[in-house]
Image (cartoon, helix red, strand yellow):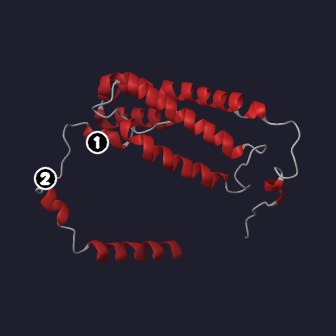
């Protein structure tokens, strides 16, 4: 009940706020609310490269974004390092995903995970967009599957070689301070 009331209030406020400017987008688009091409809306589901992005640059972009993701995730969960306090790891990972997709997502949607692209691409092929979803973007379909796997291995290797291997075997009392303060759920 409270969720319904909260949602209803949010929609009501949104209608009041946007009520005076709702015609602004109609003047901008001259009343034509359409996308170009029969398969243009497939980009809602799967990742596709921007028109200016070559296949090799898109591949490098996907490898780099996934490598950065893995380096940061290793850092978040590394207890021998100054990691995130216990209980806040999911929030840190969520913020990390927001930062990466906002900074690297303009080129090709920033898949960073084969499941982020392959499942939706199969759905769009079955749901009516046809097999063109696999040939679009100069046969782009394989890049968000292969590149994140290589980027994940690269990111893990970078963290292990340059950071984790250099941890001392014993933890000092200062570095173990984060384990003393543990957040718990107050139910």
43 relative to 175, above or below: above
| Residue 27 seen | yes
Q: Quadrant of residue 50?
A: top left
| Residue 131 seen | no
* Residue 148 falls left or right of residue 22: right
Mark 1 residue element? helix
Q: Residue at x 50, y 35 (%)?
A: 65
- Give the residue pinned by disc 1: 41
Q: Position of residue 164 (x, y in %)?
A: 74, 34
Q: Marks 1 and 2: in contact by CB < 8 Å?
A: no
105 relative to 148, above or below: below
Quadrant location of the C terminus in the rendered image: bottom right
88 relative to 108, above or below: below
Nearer to us in this view, 34 or 79: 79
- Tally the numbered discs: 2
Q: Position of residue 42 (x, y in %)?
A: 32, 39
Q: Residues within 10 Å of mark 2 (few under 14, many from 20)?
A: few
Q: Position of residue 121 (x, y in %)?
A: 40, 33
Q: Which one is earlier in the sequence, the residue at label 2 or at label 1?
A: 2
Q: Residue at x 77, y 45 (%)?
A: 79
Quick one: which residue is furthest to the left in this view? 30
Nearer to us in this view, 126 or 148: 148
Q: Residues within 10 Å of mark 1 (few under 14, many from 20)?
A: some
Nearer to us in this view, 1 or 105: 105
- Give the residue pinned by disc 2: 32
């Amino acid at each position: 009940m409270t969720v319904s009331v909260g949602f209803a209030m949010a929609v009501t406020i949104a209608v009041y706020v946007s009520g005076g400017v709702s015609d602004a987008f109609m003047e901008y688009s001259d009343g034509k609310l359409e996308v170009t091409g029969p398969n243009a809306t497939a980009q809602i589901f799967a990742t596709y490269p921007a028109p200016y992005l070559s296949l090799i640059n898109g591949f490098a972009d996907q490898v780099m974004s996934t490598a950065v993701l893995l380096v940061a995730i290793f850092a978040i969960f590394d207890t021998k390092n100054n990691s995130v306090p216990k209980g806040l790891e999911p929030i840190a990972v969520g913020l990390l995903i927001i930062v990466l997709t906002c900074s690297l997502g303009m080129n090709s949607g920033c898949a960073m995970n084969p499941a982020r692209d392959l499942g939706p691409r199969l759905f769009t092929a079955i749901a009516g967009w046809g097999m063109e979803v696999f040939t679009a973007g100069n046969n782009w379909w394989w890049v968000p599957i292969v590149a994140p796997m290589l980027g994940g291995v690269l990111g893990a290797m970078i963290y292990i070689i340059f950071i984790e291997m250099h941890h001392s075997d014993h933890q000092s009392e200062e570095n173990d301070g984060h384990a003393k303060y543990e957040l718990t759920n107050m139910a």
